[in-house]
Amino acid sequence: MTQRALAANEATPSNALGVRNFRCLWLNTITFALVMNATRFVYGWVVLDALNRSESQQGLVVFLLGIPTLVLVLPAGVWADRLDRRWLLLGTQLGGGLVLFGTAVLIGQGHLSMTMLVISALALGSILAVGSPVRSSLIPEVLPKELLYSGIALNALAMTGSMVVGAVVAQLVGEVFDFDGVFAYLGFLMLLGVVAIHRMDTPPRHGNPNSVTMRSAVGEGLEFVAGDAALRTLFGLLALAGAVMNALMFVTVQAFVKEDLGRTAGDAAPLFGLIGIGLAIGSTIVMRRGNMPNKGTVFLRAMTCGTFLLALMGRTTAFWQIALLCLLMGVAGGFFINMNQGLIQSNTPSHLMGRVMGLYSLVQAGLTPFGALAFGLLADAIGPGNTITWAAGAAFLITVTTYIRAEAIHEIA
């Protein structure tokens, strides 16, 4: 059964939420996103306040939450193409819930330690890494092609909303029910996601007989992307966004607010909120106009605007100026995130979707820590403002060059 066959069972609705299978996936995504965006805060909070450890040990635990992504997302993409994606997603949800409830029980019984927290972080990070490409690969499987951008935008809205409220709600729960209570709350969210995904119907996966080994299966996905000029460019720009734009926005800008604008590092928090609002605006526009013409050209224009706005941030002299630029940057980012994923998924066959989404997750999330490290060293040498302007300016030139020369992107649909 194909995605069109699945969609044929229902009258084509005006947006993705009208498709029952997508509604189930979207509700699952909301619970998953709330957990994912709260865990870095919660684990760091426990290290600093419950264990009274240093910031470096806090950083270690948060790093261990993310490091499984570099190792597991490509194999997870292969599993998503070989196995039933719904059951694979159910397994990761149940596994994450067990880890979180187990951590809550150990803390409640007085067994909290740095070793226990490290093991918990590694286990949960591994489960989240496996679930990410599986969840992404399900979107085009349960939606007709004309609703793909609507579904991707709705998923982005779920992620954006969870960024705003995830850590805040977790903190409130922890203040009332202590640290074991907050882990139990996160485990409960994972089980709610199981209920949502259990009601979803997807065609079974029978694997690819041409992919005998894990290495050859991963290689097939890489060869597919490398052999398509438009996909190569889309992944290249995704890598540029992950290594440069994300690192500058979420790390270097905070240093700029303190060092160049003379405020506290905590004053950067409202800027991240404005970025989230902008992302929601951009995602809503894409959701409502998902079938817009010249999608590749619109995508390149959004990235060109985003890199230019980011370069301007390094030249601001007042907080209101960078706040306005962050809001506009978020709108451009909403277009970039949704249209990049949509263009990739709409041009990837179903039997390779898991592997391509595994590569997508790796490039999207795996390069930011390295960019943050490099720009931190550069900022020490030339200052945060200059670092933002010069690095974002270089990204702007690369994007403009791509806009002029990459005909395959302008022609992609």
Image: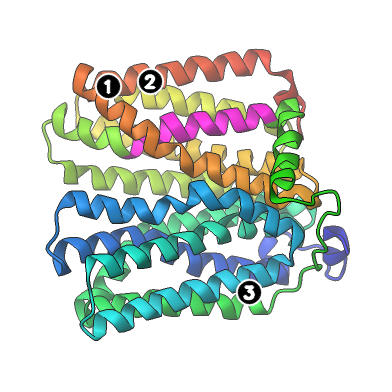
Q: CA distance from mark 3 to mark 1?
A: 45 Å
Q: Secondary structure at mark 3?
A: helix
Q: Evaluate whether residue 290 shows in this view.
A: no
Residue 16: percent from the left, percent from the top? 69, 60
Q: Which residues are magenta?
A: 232-250
Residue 358: percent from the left, percent from the top? 62, 48
Q: Is residue 125 above or below residue 341?
A: below
Determine whether label 1 and label 2 are within 8 Å by CB. yes
User: Does the magenta segment cover residue 19?
Assistant: no
Q: Nearer the viewer, mark 1 or mark 2?
A: 1
Residue of label 2: 391
In primary-sequence order, the first of circles 2 and 3 is 3
- Residue at image location 76% in from the left, 63% down from the top: 13
Kind of residue at badge 1: Leu
Q: Quadrant of residue 310?
A: top left
Residue of label 3: 197
Q: For the N terminus, which image quadrant?
A: bottom right
Q: Is residue 376 above or below residue 204?
A: above
